[in-house]
Image: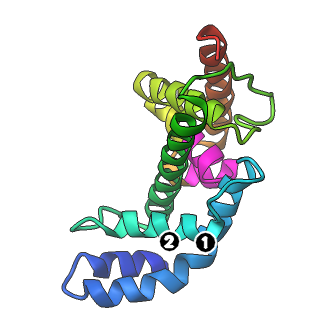
Amino acid sequence: MSDVTRILADMRGQSREAAVERLFPLVYNELRVLARAHLRRERSDHTLQATALVHEAYLRLLGGVQPPWNDRQHFFRAAAEAMRRILIEHARKRGRVKRGGKRQRVELSDVDLANSGDPDRLLALDEAFRRLEEQDPQAADVVRLRFFAGLSVEETAQATGLSERTVKREWAFARAWLYDALRDTGR
């Protein structure tokens, strides 16, 4: 059992406050790497910085009464989702204020799902991702771990309990599905 998993187990017990204090230094550097990966896909003049994104996500993760994480991978999956939601909220706010909330067409490359920092494109991707989540939760989970959390095929396979071959197949399917969904809606 990793130190992070052990601390997460302690958080369910009576020593929650002490466990929270021990957890942050252990996960901080990895959360910063994850935040930087998210922000690399954003526009260059983005107002959020990796440190702010890490702190906001961490506060959201620990804001609940009882943390629902089973292990280290589960925690980082939740952190990636929290960061994604923060960036989506930021893009929505920027779109409302700066562009009147109008959306634009989004093209997906074969390599990257969102290679632009344009908030309208990010919102269109989020909308398509939510539809994928409803239709095929397993494929959406692979996208969440591969794209949003930055895990490798091997790490995604370990986190989901799927074979590497299945992860590759789901990843290819999800990218094609998202491309078609965005193309069909004209975004």
The residue that appears at 51% across and 35% down in the rendered structure is: 96
Name the amino acid, label 2. His
| Highlighted range, magenta | 143-158
Residue 79 lies, in percent from the top left, at 48, 60
The residue that appears at 40% across and 88% down in the rendered structure is: 21
Residue position for label 1: 51
Residue 12 lies, in percent from the top left, at 24, 75
Name the amino acid, label 1. Thr
Say which of 152 and 176 sits in front.
Answer: 176
- Residue 3 appears anywhere in the view: no
Q: Main secondary structure of the magenta part?
A: helix
Magenta-span inclusion, residue 145: yes
Q: Is residue 1 above or below residue 53?
A: below
115 sits to left or right of 51 = right
The residue that appears at 40% across and 69% down in the rendered structure is: 59
Say which of 187 and 25 sits in front.
Answer: 187
Q: Is residue 23 above or below residue 67?
A: below
Residue 42 lies, in percent from the top left, at 70, 48
The residue that appears at 61% across and 27% down in the rendered structure is: 174
User: What numbered label is drawn on residue 163?
Assistant: none
Say which of 32 and 173 sits in front.
Answer: 32
Location of residue 52 (image quadrant)? bottom right
Residue position for label 2: 55
The N terminus - image quarter: bottom left
Q: Is residue 45 above or below residue 177?
A: below
User: Is disc 1 in contact with disc 2, using a CB cutoff of under 8 Å?
Assistant: yes
